[in-house]
Image: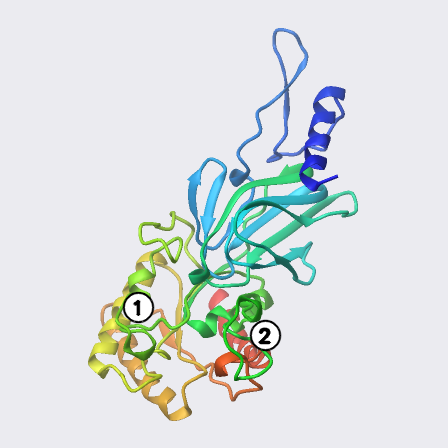
Amino acid sequence: MPSGWRAWAVVLMAVVVGCPAPLEEGASAARRVDEGTGRPQRLAEPPWPELVHMVGRFERLGPEHVRYGWPGTGIVVRFHGAALSVLMDDRAGYHGVSVDGGPSMTLRTRPGSHRWSVVDGLPPGEHTVVLRRRTEGHLGPTEVLGVEVEGTLLSAPAPAARIEVVGDSITAGYGNEGRARDCRFSPRTENHLRSYAALAAEAVGAELSAVAWSGKGVVHNYGGDPVEPMPAIYERAVPTEADARAPAIESADVVLVNLGTNDFSTDADPSAERFVLGYVGLLADVRARHPDAPILCTVAPMLSRSETATVESYLDQAIALRWAAGDRDVQRIDLWEEPRGWGCDSHPSIATHEAMASRLRPWLDAALQ
């Protein structure tokens, strides 16, 4: 029997036979006593987005319809039962699935409206499932049209801490699961959930919201492309949708910016003045969105050591201007690592991402204290 029918069969049995379901505050099914008859009445279930926790930026298109696209975005579903299915129209192709804090498994999807069995056959009891995009936004958005559980949907808890990272292909996890530097990009070899920022956030017990797109720079993109560098798209809820603005959310506890590689990776290097002013503007945008968060700035690890030193000097100039403007909770950190193997198109391998995560973790620990 398809998973969706199983979910409906359980709901139907509870209504017709009157089987009790485990309930608690925040559950999606509840009962009250009719004052006239003294008989129990079933309350209307709230829309699933009111109980499911959204990871990262998203756009709500209707009471039970959300859309997102940044790498690592997704949903946290807490429920009492044995199975979870999600109705999605998805272009991401690859998602990570974690059950009760366990290791990530892969859910492979395809475009069109389909009901995907995320997990099935779990032991009876309460479970928390995290479903997140592995791939980045230029592949197209993910639209979630429904969440169905074989059991009772419960309210998902808020994270203990939040981190935002702003970056390019390095942060997106471009090619990190590739086997050699000469393989070309494919969704299969991109896994943001194994990127340095995702690994470090997991290590410190924080939730990560990534704003990352391959090839993006501060004042221009890879190869001198001037169309929509990162500051032009930073505010978007869905990266490919110019009119999609992220809803008001709680400020991040710390923000990491890892940009500048694409500005200086070809012969079309911007002037120091132009780059510094562009970076100052980006930092101002980040501060407006996260007024109390420490901001950590880096550029690593794909430029040469000498190129990195040049860009770091520009970051120092931009940070000094922000300090002069009264924003003194901004600093530069060093995440540069020698390559430990290669991913596709000479991008960092999983081993290099792990080494970067180890360098990043102490900075996050200090910022979150």
Q: Which residue is mark 2?
A: 177
Q: With 19 as the anchor, is 180 left or right in this view?
A: left
Q: Residue furthest bottom?
A: 306
Residue 101: x percent and y percent? 67, 58
Q: Are marks 2 and 1 in contact (CB under 8 Å)?
A: no
The answer to whether residue 337 is above or below residue 40 is: below
Q: Is residue 117 visible?
A: yes
The answer to whether residue 67 is above or below residue 301 is: above
What residue do we see at 54% from left, 61% from top?
206
Q: With 279 as the anchor, is 205 left or right in this view?
A: right
Q: Residue furthest right?
A: 123
Residue 253: x percent and y percent? 45, 60
What residue do we see at 68% from left, 54% from top?
99
Chosen colour scheme: rainbow
Q: With 64 as the anchor, is 322 left or right in this view?
A: left
Q: Which residue is mark 1?
A: 229
Residue 157: x percent and y percent? 58, 47
Q: In which quadrant of the rendered view does residue 96 lie?
A: bottom right
Q: Which amino acid does the dot numbered 2 rest on? A: Glu
Residue 115: x percent and y percent? 61, 44
